[in-house]
Amino acid sequence: MEAKQTTKKKYTLKEKLMAIGPGAMITASFIGPGTVTTCTRTGASYGYALLWTVIFSIIATMVLQEMSARLGVVSRLGLGEAIAKQFKNPALRTFSIALVGISITLGCAAYISGDLSGSAMGISTITGIDSQIIGPIIGCIVLFIVYKGSFKILERLLTALVVVMAVVFVTTMFVAKPDLGEVARGFIPSVPAGGMMMVISLIGTTIVPYNFFIHSSSAKENWPSEDMLELSKWDTIVSIGVGGLITAAILITSGTLMRGITVTSAADLSIQLEPLLGSWAKVFLSVGLFAAGLSSAIATPLGASYTLAGLLGWEYGHHDKRFRNVNIAIVIVGIIVSGTGFSPLTIILMAQALNGIILPIVVIYLVIVTCNKKLLGEHTNGPIAVILGIAIGIITIILGGSALISAIQSIMAMF
Protein backbone atom coordinates (compact mmCIF):
# COMPACT_ATOMS: atom_id res chain seq x y z
CA MET A 1 0.00 0.00 0.00
CA GLU A 2 2.94 2.37 0.61
CA ALA A 3 5.74 2.18 -1.92
CA LYS A 4 8.16 4.78 -0.60
CA GLN A 5 8.35 3.97 3.09
CA THR A 6 11.84 3.64 4.57
CA THR A 7 11.86 2.31 8.11
CA LYS A 8 14.99 2.88 10.22
CA LYS A 9 14.11 0.31 12.88
CA LYS A 10 12.83 -3.22 12.70
CA TYR A 11 10.31 -4.18 15.36
CA THR A 12 9.81 -7.54 17.03
CA LEU A 13 6.49 -9.38 16.90
CA LYS A 14 5.94 -8.57 20.58
CA GLU A 15 6.48 -4.86 19.92
CA LYS A 16 4.03 -4.99 17.02
CA LEU A 17 1.37 -6.72 19.09
CA MET A 18 1.84 -4.21 21.92
CA ALA A 19 1.40 -1.37 19.41
CA ILE A 20 -2.10 -2.41 18.37
CA GLY A 21 -4.43 0.42 19.40
CA PRO A 22 -5.84 3.03 16.98
CA GLY A 23 -6.60 0.38 14.36
CA ALA A 24 -8.37 -1.77 16.93
CA MET A 25 -10.56 1.17 17.87
CA ILE A 26 -11.47 1.68 14.21
CA THR A 27 -12.50 -1.98 14.05
CA ALA A 28 -14.52 -1.64 17.26
CA SER A 29 -16.19 1.39 15.71
CA PHE A 30 -17.39 -0.34 12.54
CA ILE A 31 -18.29 -3.67 14.21
CA GLY A 32 -21.54 -2.34 15.63
CA PRO A 33 -25.28 -3.00 15.27
CA GLY A 34 -25.04 -1.95 11.63
CA THR A 35 -22.56 -4.70 10.81
CA VAL A 36 -24.53 -7.41 12.64
CA THR A 37 -27.84 -6.30 11.15
CA THR A 38 -26.67 -5.67 7.60
CA CYS A 39 -24.63 -8.88 7.30
CA THR A 40 -27.41 -10.98 8.81
CA ARG A 41 -30.05 -9.54 6.49
CA THR A 42 -27.74 -9.95 3.52
CA GLY A 43 -27.03 -13.59 4.30
CA ALA A 44 -30.70 -14.34 4.97
CA SER A 45 -31.80 -12.68 1.72
CA TYR A 46 -29.00 -13.56 -0.71
CA GLY A 47 -26.94 -16.31 0.89
CA TYR A 48 -23.25 -15.89 0.11
CA ALA A 49 -23.77 -13.96 -3.14
CA LEU A 50 -22.55 -10.64 -1.71
CA LEU A 51 -19.55 -12.01 0.19
CA TRP A 52 -17.34 -10.30 -2.40
CA THR A 53 -18.62 -6.97 -1.12
CA VAL A 54 -17.19 -7.74 2.33
CA ILE A 55 -13.80 -8.60 0.80
CA PHE A 56 -13.80 -5.39 -1.26
CA SER A 57 -14.81 -3.34 1.78
CA ILE A 58 -12.06 -4.76 4.00
CA ILE A 59 -9.31 -4.30 1.40
CA ALA A 60 -10.53 -0.76 0.73
CA THR A 61 -10.66 -0.02 4.46
CA MET A 62 -7.09 -1.24 4.93
CA VAL A 63 -5.85 0.94 2.07
CA LEU A 64 -7.71 4.06 3.15
CA GLN A 65 -7.10 3.75 6.89
CA GLU A 66 -3.38 3.17 6.23
CA MET A 67 -3.37 6.44 4.31
CA SER A 68 -5.12 8.19 7.21
CA ALA A 69 -2.75 6.84 9.85
CA ARG A 70 0.34 7.62 7.72
CA LEU A 71 -0.91 11.18 7.25
CA GLY A 72 -1.17 11.64 11.02
CA VAL A 73 2.21 10.07 11.85
CA VAL A 74 4.22 11.92 9.17
CA SER A 75 2.51 15.31 8.83
CA ARG A 76 1.41 15.58 12.50
CA LEU A 77 -1.97 16.75 11.17
CA GLY A 78 -5.46 15.33 11.36
CA LEU A 79 -7.26 14.75 8.05
CA GLY A 80 -9.46 17.81 8.62
CA GLU A 81 -6.41 20.05 9.09
CA ALA A 82 -4.75 18.55 6.01
CA ILE A 83 -7.81 19.24 3.85
CA ALA A 84 -7.94 22.84 5.10
CA LYS A 85 -4.24 23.31 4.22
CA GLN A 86 -4.47 21.56 0.84
CA PHE A 87 -6.17 24.33 -1.13
CA LYS A 88 -4.76 27.84 -1.44
CA ASN A 89 -7.67 29.19 -3.50
CA PRO A 90 -10.09 30.71 -0.93
CA ALA A 91 -13.23 29.67 -2.83
CA LEU A 92 -12.06 26.07 -3.31
CA ARG A 93 -10.89 25.88 0.29
CA THR A 94 -14.23 27.15 1.60
CA PHE A 95 -16.16 24.79 -0.66
CA SER A 96 -14.07 21.80 0.47
CA ILE A 97 -14.44 22.62 4.16
CA ALA A 98 -18.21 23.05 3.80
CA LEU A 99 -18.69 19.91 1.69
CA VAL A 100 -16.66 17.62 3.94
CA GLY A 101 -17.88 19.17 7.19
CA ILE A 102 -21.58 18.93 6.28
CA SER A 103 -21.23 15.43 4.82
CA ILE A 104 -19.43 13.97 7.85
CA THR A 105 -21.75 15.70 10.33
CA LEU A 106 -24.83 14.31 8.56
CA GLY A 107 -23.20 10.88 8.40
CA CYS A 108 -22.40 10.91 12.12
CA ALA A 109 -25.96 11.96 12.96
CA ALA A 110 -27.27 9.04 10.90
CA TYR A 111 -24.78 6.63 12.42
CA ILE A 112 -25.52 7.49 16.05
CA SER A 113 -29.24 7.13 15.33
CA GLY A 114 -28.52 3.59 14.16
CA ASP A 115 -26.19 2.92 17.11
CA LEU A 116 -28.77 3.97 19.70
CA SER A 117 -31.55 2.11 17.90
CA GLY A 118 -29.38 -1.03 17.75
CA SER A 119 -28.51 -0.80 21.45
CA ALA A 120 -32.17 -0.30 22.29
CA MET A 121 -33.17 -3.25 20.12
CA GLY A 122 -30.86 -5.49 22.14
CA ILE A 123 -32.22 -4.40 25.53
CA SER A 124 -35.81 -4.44 24.26
CA THR A 125 -35.48 -8.11 23.32
CA ILE A 126 -34.51 -9.02 26.89
CA THR A 127 -36.83 -6.70 28.82
CA GLY A 128 -39.82 -6.43 26.49
CA ILE A 129 -39.76 -2.63 26.86
CA ASP A 130 -40.35 -0.75 23.59
CA SER A 131 -37.07 0.26 21.92
CA GLN A 132 -38.67 3.67 21.27
CA ILE A 133 -38.43 4.24 25.03
CA ILE A 134 -35.08 2.58 25.63
CA GLY A 135 -33.28 4.37 22.76
CA PRO A 136 -33.56 7.88 24.24
CA ILE A 137 -32.61 6.55 27.70
CA ILE A 138 -29.41 5.01 26.33
CA GLY A 139 -28.86 8.24 24.41
CA CYS A 140 -28.97 10.20 27.66
CA ILE A 141 -26.35 7.87 29.15
CA VAL A 142 -24.13 8.44 26.12
CA LEU A 143 -24.78 12.18 26.37
CA PHE A 144 -23.56 12.16 30.00
CA ILE A 145 -20.44 10.16 29.09
CA VAL A 146 -19.65 12.41 26.12
CA TYR A 147 -20.27 15.57 28.17
CA LYS A 148 -17.95 14.42 30.96
CA GLY A 149 -15.40 13.12 28.46
CA SER A 150 -14.64 10.11 30.70
CA PHE A 151 -15.25 7.24 28.31
CA LYS A 152 -11.86 5.48 28.07
CA ILE A 153 -12.49 2.77 30.69
CA LEU A 154 -16.04 2.11 29.48
CA GLU A 155 -14.84 2.01 25.90
CA ARG A 156 -12.30 -0.71 26.74
CA LEU A 157 -14.94 -2.76 28.51
CA LEU A 158 -17.36 -2.51 25.60
CA THR A 159 -14.62 -3.35 23.12
CA ALA A 160 -13.90 -6.50 25.14
CA LEU A 161 -17.58 -7.47 24.91
CA VAL A 162 -17.51 -6.95 21.15
CA VAL A 163 -14.44 -9.23 20.96
CA VAL A 164 -16.33 -11.92 22.85
CA MET A 165 -19.20 -11.58 20.38
CA ALA A 166 -16.71 -11.87 17.52
CA VAL A 167 -15.27 -15.12 18.90
CA VAL A 168 -18.74 -16.62 19.15
CA PHE A 169 -19.70 -15.59 15.58
CA VAL A 170 -16.50 -17.04 14.10
CA THR A 171 -16.93 -20.26 16.11
CA THR A 172 -20.57 -20.49 15.06
CA MET A 173 -19.54 -20.15 11.41
CA PHE A 174 -17.53 -23.36 11.69
CA VAL A 175 -20.28 -25.11 13.67
CA ALA A 176 -22.80 -24.18 10.94
CA LYS A 177 -20.69 -26.09 8.35
CA PRO A 178 -21.35 -23.90 5.27
CA ASP A 179 -21.00 -25.30 1.76
CA LEU A 180 -17.43 -24.24 0.96
CA GLY A 181 -17.99 -24.46 -2.80
CA GLU A 182 -20.92 -22.09 -2.59
CA VAL A 183 -18.98 -19.81 -0.25
CA ALA A 184 -16.17 -19.67 -2.83
CA ARG A 185 -18.66 -18.60 -5.52
CA GLY A 186 -19.58 -15.67 -3.26
CA PHE A 187 -16.16 -14.19 -4.00
CA ILE A 188 -17.20 -13.65 -7.64
CA PRO A 189 -18.74 -10.13 -7.99
CA SER A 190 -22.44 -10.16 -8.85
CA VAL A 191 -25.50 -8.26 -7.64
CA PRO A 192 -28.74 -10.25 -7.29
CA ALA A 193 -32.01 -8.56 -8.20
CA GLY A 194 -32.84 -5.99 -5.54
CA GLY A 195 -29.43 -6.36 -3.90
CA MET A 196 -27.86 -2.99 -4.75
CA MET A 197 -28.98 -1.31 -1.53
CA MET A 198 -27.46 -4.17 0.46
CA VAL A 199 -24.18 -3.71 -1.42
CA ILE A 200 -24.17 -0.03 -0.44
CA SER A 201 -25.08 -0.88 3.15
CA LEU A 202 -22.31 -3.48 3.47
CA ILE A 203 -19.77 -0.95 2.20
CA GLY A 204 -21.23 1.82 4.38
CA THR A 205 -21.05 -0.29 7.54
CA THR A 206 -17.35 -1.13 6.98
CA ILE A 207 -15.71 1.86 5.27
CA VAL A 208 -16.86 4.58 7.65
CA PRO A 209 -15.90 8.11 6.49
CA TYR A 210 -15.53 9.64 9.96
CA ASN A 211 -13.06 6.89 10.95
CA PHE A 212 -10.47 8.46 8.61
CA PHE A 213 -10.51 11.61 10.74
CA ILE A 214 -10.37 9.72 14.05
CA HIS A 215 -7.53 7.48 12.81
CA SER A 216 -5.28 10.27 11.57
CA SER A 217 -5.66 12.16 14.84
CA SER A 218 -5.16 9.12 17.11
CA ALA A 219 -2.19 7.88 15.03
CA LYS A 220 -0.26 11.12 15.48
CA GLU A 221 -0.81 10.86 19.25
CA ASN A 222 0.27 7.19 19.47
CA TRP A 223 3.25 7.27 17.09
CA PRO A 224 5.30 10.50 17.33
CA SER A 225 8.04 9.39 14.91
CA GLU A 226 8.17 8.43 11.23
CA ASP A 227 10.25 5.43 12.34
CA MET A 228 7.02 4.02 13.79
CA LEU A 229 5.20 3.81 10.46
CA GLU A 230 5.79 0.06 10.47
CA LEU A 231 3.90 -0.23 13.77
CA SER A 232 1.10 1.93 12.42
CA LYS A 233 0.78 -0.18 9.29
CA TRP A 234 0.83 -3.44 11.28
CA ASP A 235 -1.85 -2.12 13.62
CA THR A 236 -4.07 -1.14 10.70
CA ILE A 237 -3.77 -4.36 8.70
CA VAL A 238 -4.13 -6.77 11.63
CA SER A 239 -6.98 -4.92 13.35
CA ILE A 240 -9.05 -4.38 10.23
CA GLY A 241 -8.28 -7.91 9.02
CA VAL A 242 -9.84 -9.25 12.23
CA GLY A 243 -12.84 -6.99 11.62
CA GLY A 244 -13.18 -8.46 8.14
CA LEU A 245 -13.14 -12.00 9.52
CA ILE A 246 -15.93 -11.08 11.94
CA THR A 247 -18.01 -9.46 9.20
CA ALA A 248 -17.61 -12.40 6.83
CA ALA A 249 -18.41 -14.87 9.62
CA ILE A 250 -21.72 -13.16 10.36
CA LEU A 251 -22.74 -13.14 6.68
CA ILE A 252 -21.68 -16.74 6.07
CA THR A 253 -23.40 -17.99 9.23
CA SER A 254 -26.67 -16.26 8.42
CA GLY A 255 -26.42 -17.41 4.80
CA THR A 256 -26.11 -20.99 6.06
CA LEU A 257 -28.70 -21.02 8.83
CA MET A 258 -31.18 -18.24 8.03
CA ARG A 259 -31.62 -18.21 4.25
CA GLY A 260 -35.17 -17.19 3.37
CA ILE A 261 -35.97 -15.89 6.87
CA THR A 262 -37.23 -12.32 7.12
CA VAL A 263 -35.19 -10.48 9.76
CA THR A 264 -37.32 -8.01 11.73
CA SER A 265 -35.95 -8.12 15.30
CA ALA A 266 -32.99 -9.01 17.49
CA ALA A 267 -34.71 -12.31 18.18
CA ASP A 268 -34.47 -13.10 14.45
CA LEU A 269 -30.81 -12.10 14.41
CA SER A 270 -30.08 -14.57 17.22
CA ILE A 271 -31.24 -17.59 15.19
CA GLN A 272 -27.75 -17.93 13.71
CA LEU A 273 -26.22 -18.34 17.19
CA GLU A 274 -28.54 -21.13 18.34
CA PRO A 275 -26.28 -24.00 17.13
CA LEU A 276 -23.59 -22.82 19.56
CA LEU A 277 -25.51 -21.12 22.38
CA GLY A 278 -28.93 -22.76 22.31
CA SER A 279 -31.48 -20.97 24.48
CA TRP A 280 -28.86 -18.40 25.48
CA ALA A 281 -28.52 -17.15 21.88
CA LYS A 282 -31.12 -14.41 22.25
CA VAL A 283 -29.64 -13.08 25.50
CA PHE A 284 -26.10 -13.13 24.13
CA LEU A 285 -26.95 -11.29 20.93
CA SER A 286 -29.03 -8.75 22.82
CA VAL A 287 -26.13 -7.94 25.15
CA GLY A 288 -23.75 -7.92 22.19
CA LEU A 289 -25.93 -5.49 20.24
CA PHE A 290 -26.12 -3.24 23.29
CA ALA A 291 -22.35 -3.32 23.81
CA ALA A 292 -21.53 -2.77 20.15
CA GLY A 293 -24.12 -0.01 19.79
CA LEU A 294 -23.08 1.85 22.92
CA SER A 295 -19.39 1.63 22.04
CA SER A 296 -20.04 2.98 18.54
CA ALA A 297 -22.39 5.66 19.90
CA ILE A 298 -19.60 6.97 22.12
CA ALA A 299 -17.13 7.08 19.21
CA THR A 300 -19.47 8.53 16.57
CA PRO A 301 -19.82 12.07 18.00
CA LEU A 302 -16.02 12.25 18.17
CA GLY A 303 -15.91 11.65 14.42
CA ALA A 304 -17.87 14.83 13.80
CA SER A 305 -15.92 16.81 16.39
CA TYR A 306 -12.49 15.76 15.09
CA THR A 307 -13.57 16.54 11.54
CA LEU A 308 -14.91 20.02 12.28
CA ALA A 309 -12.04 20.83 14.66
CA GLY A 310 -9.49 20.08 11.96
CA LEU A 311 -11.39 21.86 9.20
CA LEU A 312 -12.17 24.98 11.22
CA GLY A 313 -9.02 25.25 13.34
CA TRP A 314 -10.50 24.38 16.72
CA GLU A 315 -8.54 22.72 19.49
CA TYR A 316 -8.99 18.97 19.91
CA GLY A 317 -10.60 18.07 23.24
CA HIS A 318 -13.44 18.99 25.55
CA HIS A 319 -11.67 22.09 26.82
CA ASP A 320 -12.79 23.68 23.54
CA LYS A 321 -16.52 24.37 23.93
CA ARG A 322 -17.13 24.10 20.19
CA PHE A 323 -15.63 20.59 20.12
CA ARG A 324 -17.77 19.55 23.09
CA ASN A 325 -20.94 21.19 21.75
CA VAL A 326 -20.69 19.26 18.47
CA ASN A 327 -20.47 16.02 20.47
CA ILE A 328 -23.58 16.98 22.41
CA ALA A 329 -25.53 18.07 19.32
CA ILE A 330 -24.85 14.78 17.49
CA VAL A 331 -26.01 12.73 20.48
CA ILE A 332 -29.20 14.82 20.81
CA VAL A 333 -30.04 14.11 17.15
CA GLY A 334 -29.58 10.39 17.86
CA ILE A 335 -31.85 10.60 20.89
CA ILE A 336 -34.61 12.27 18.88
CA VAL A 337 -34.41 9.81 15.96
CA SER A 338 -34.24 6.73 18.21
CA GLY A 339 -37.43 7.87 19.91
CA THR A 340 -39.44 8.43 16.74
CA GLY A 341 -40.86 4.92 16.58
CA PHE A 342 -39.27 3.99 13.25
CA SER A 343 -38.07 0.38 12.98
CA PRO A 344 -34.56 0.12 14.50
CA LEU A 345 -33.47 -2.16 11.65
CA THR A 346 -34.69 0.37 9.07
CA ILE A 347 -32.80 3.20 10.80
CA ILE A 348 -29.60 1.14 10.90
CA LEU A 349 -29.77 0.16 7.23
CA MET A 350 -30.58 3.73 6.10
CA ALA A 351 -27.58 5.01 8.10
CA GLN A 352 -25.29 2.57 6.29
CA ALA A 353 -26.75 3.57 2.91
CA LEU A 354 -26.30 7.31 3.63
CA ASN A 355 -22.66 6.77 4.56
CA GLY A 356 -22.19 4.80 1.35
CA ILE A 357 -23.30 7.91 -0.55
CA ILE A 358 -21.03 10.24 1.48
CA LEU A 359 -18.00 7.95 1.25
CA PRO A 360 -16.77 8.92 -2.27
CA ILE A 361 -16.45 12.56 -1.23
CA VAL A 362 -14.12 11.78 1.67
CA VAL A 363 -12.14 9.16 -0.29
CA ILE A 364 -11.32 11.71 -3.00
CA TYR A 365 -10.03 14.25 -0.48
CA LEU A 366 -8.05 11.60 1.43
CA VAL A 367 -6.24 10.45 -1.73
CA ILE A 368 -5.49 14.05 -2.74
CA VAL A 369 -3.94 15.10 0.59
CA THR A 370 -1.87 11.90 0.95
CA CYS A 371 -0.32 12.63 -2.48
CA ASN A 372 0.86 16.05 -1.25
CA LYS A 373 4.68 16.03 -0.98
CA LYS A 374 4.65 19.20 1.12
CA LEU A 375 2.75 17.30 3.81
CA LEU A 376 4.23 13.81 3.52
CA GLY A 377 7.56 14.20 1.73
CA GLU A 378 8.93 10.80 0.75
CA HIS A 379 5.96 9.10 2.42
CA THR A 380 3.36 10.17 -0.13
CA ASN A 381 1.24 7.48 -1.75
CA GLY A 382 3.19 5.11 -3.97
CA PRO A 383 1.84 4.16 -7.43
CA ILE A 384 -0.05 1.13 -6.09
CA ALA A 385 -1.72 3.16 -3.34
CA VAL A 386 -2.74 5.84 -5.86
CA ILE A 387 -4.21 3.27 -8.25
CA LEU A 388 -6.09 1.52 -5.44
CA GLY A 389 -7.34 4.83 -4.05
CA ILE A 390 -8.60 5.99 -7.45
CA ALA A 391 -10.23 2.59 -8.10
CA ILE A 392 -11.96 2.64 -4.72
CA GLY A 393 -13.12 6.21 -5.35
CA ILE A 394 -14.60 5.32 -8.76
CA ILE A 395 -16.34 2.21 -7.44
CA THR A 396 -17.84 4.05 -4.48
CA ILE A 397 -19.01 6.88 -6.77
CA ILE A 398 -20.81 4.37 -9.00
CA LEU A 399 -22.36 2.54 -6.06
CA GLY A 400 -23.22 5.75 -4.23
CA GLY A 401 -24.85 7.15 -7.38
CA SER A 402 -26.93 3.99 -7.72
CA ALA A 403 -28.07 4.30 -4.11
CA LEU A 404 -29.01 7.96 -4.63
CA ILE A 405 -31.04 7.11 -7.75
CA SER A 406 -32.79 4.29 -5.87
CA ALA A 407 -33.61 6.64 -2.99
CA ILE A 408 -35.03 9.30 -5.34
CA GLN A 409 -37.14 6.70 -7.15
CA SER A 410 -38.48 5.43 -3.83
CA ILE A 411 -39.46 8.95 -2.76
CA MET A 412 -41.13 9.69 -6.11
CA ALA A 413 -43.08 6.42 -5.87
CA MET A 414 -44.67 7.71 -2.69
CA PHE A 415 -46.45 10.51 -4.59
Image (spheres, rainbow, N blue to C red):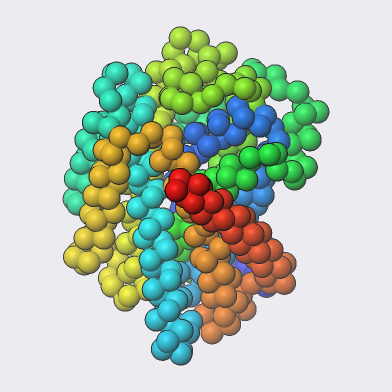
**How many circles with numbers are drawn on the protein?**
0
Q: Quadrant of the N terminus?
A: bottom right
Q: Nearer the viewer, residue 309 or 76?
A: 309
Camera sees residue 93: yes
Is 333 positioned to the left or the right of 198 in the image? left
Name the residue rendered at 41%, 89% in the picture.
Answer: 90
> Can residue 157 be seen at all in this image of the molecule?
no
Q: Residue at x 54, y 51 (%)?
A: 409
Looking at the picture, how far across and down is residue 388, in whole percent? 69, 63
Residue 75 position within the rendered picture, expressed as x and y whole percent measured from the top left: 48, 75
Image check: 175 left or right of 126? right
Find residue 159 and report its image quarter: top left
Identify which residue is drawn at 39% across, 18% down.
283
Q: In percent of the image, x 41 and y 28: which residue is there?
A: 288
Residue projecting furthest to the top: 279
**Quarter of the image where one finds residue 249:** top right
Please tell me which residue lies in front, 360 or 315.
360
The image shows residue 124, relative to residue 348, as above or below, that is above
Query: Which residue ends up furthest to the right in the rendered image?
Result: 181
Residue 342 rendering spot, x and y as whole percentages: 35, 36
User: Quick check: 141 above or below 146?
Assistant: above
Percent position of residue 232, x then y: 54, 58
